[in-house]
Amino acid sequence: MKKGLKKVITGATVLVAGLLIAGCGKQSASSKETTVKIAVMSSDEPIWKPIVKKLKKQDINLKLVEFSDYNTPNKALTEHQVDLNSFQHYNFLDSWNDAHKTNIVSIGETYIAPLNLYSSKLKSLKGIKSGDKIAIPNDATNEGRALNVLEEAGLITLKKGVKLPTVKDIAKNPKKLSITELEAAQTARALPNVAAAVVTNDIAADADLTVKDAIFRETVNARSKQWINIIAANKKDKNNKAYKKVVKAYRTAVTAKNIAKVYKGTAEPIWTLEK
């Protein structure tokens, strides 16, 4: 898989209080320290904590604002409740910008995480039988991606030429599988009640699911750039020096090790694949 990855050059509930507009990305009048607020998924906190400490030495007070869904972080960014966010890939960002007429851009790439199909009942794809229930995320980007994973696994066939397919775009479903659309955070929790579920890497990490638990894994190749995760900012802030320091502080060997530990091998740091 790593060979394929080298070709790629290349989760609304606020869990913590403190979404204050005042002070976002601004320098204190009595200090050289600059405060930067970044929206992250709750599963990413262990990855970001060492970065917070590192930036403190560079006079940057990085404040983590945790979210548990994929719909709120971009809204928080455009409303200036946070300065940055780190939770989405290019495809999700492009779809969000198109749908909401926003100008959010990437200021740095973080990691790529193939989608996995998990089951708490089956050991392989062969165990999936006629009429079984399969859970997938219901947000437009991850739903489409998950359906492509099911097609790649040989479980369904999709209509050709559909960029972001939905269940309505399933052309063939030989096993008459029941595809259940759930909020991404619910996919792992649904495992006891379905035959299998496509789970994103951050939700899988929260559920203590590893690569070894997957019964099928999405192939990563040269077309996978759209799935690279990023640190994003409002377009007018893309050249902010403090924000660039956040990106640089993220892309280190220490972070790479933390990504491997937190995501249990389900994600690959992009900068280690660019060499």
Image (cartoon, rainbow, N blue to C red):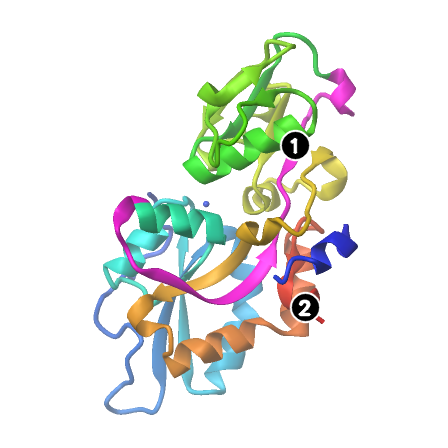
**One can see residue 269 in this view:** yes
**Near-viewer residue (30 or 235):** 235
Numbered circle sitting on residue 117: 1
Write the residue at 46% across / 35% down. 164
Relative to 21, residue 242 above or below: below
- Taking the view exactly as shown, the residue that stands out farthest to the front is 161
Nearer to the camera, 169 or 142: 169
Q: Are marks 2 and 1 in contact (CB under 8 Å)?
A: no
Instruction: Report the residue at 66% width, 66% height from top.
Output: 256
Place residue 77 in its image quadrant: bottom left
Whether residue 137 is situated above or below residue 110 in the rendered picture: above
User: SS for tag 2?
Assistant: loop
Relative image position of residue 179 (x, y in whole percent): 53, 19
User: Quarter-wise, where is residue 188 in the image?
Assistant: top right
Instruction: Look at 61% across and 21% down and name the residue there.
Output: 157
Mark before the other along the chain sequence, 2 or 1: 1
For label 1, the SS is strand
In percent of width and height, residue 52 lies at: 49, 74
x 40%, y 83%: residue: 241
Instruction: Please tell me which residue lies in front, 75 or 47.
Output: 75
Could you tell me residue 66's position as x and y percent? 41, 55
Graded by Cα atoms within 10 Å as few (under 14), some (14 to 19) or many (20 or more), the crowding at tag 2 reads few
On the rendered structure, is 86 left or right of 34? right
The magenta segment: 99-127
Q: Residue under circle 2?
A: 274
- Spatial distance from mark 2 to mark 1, Cα to Cα? 27 Å
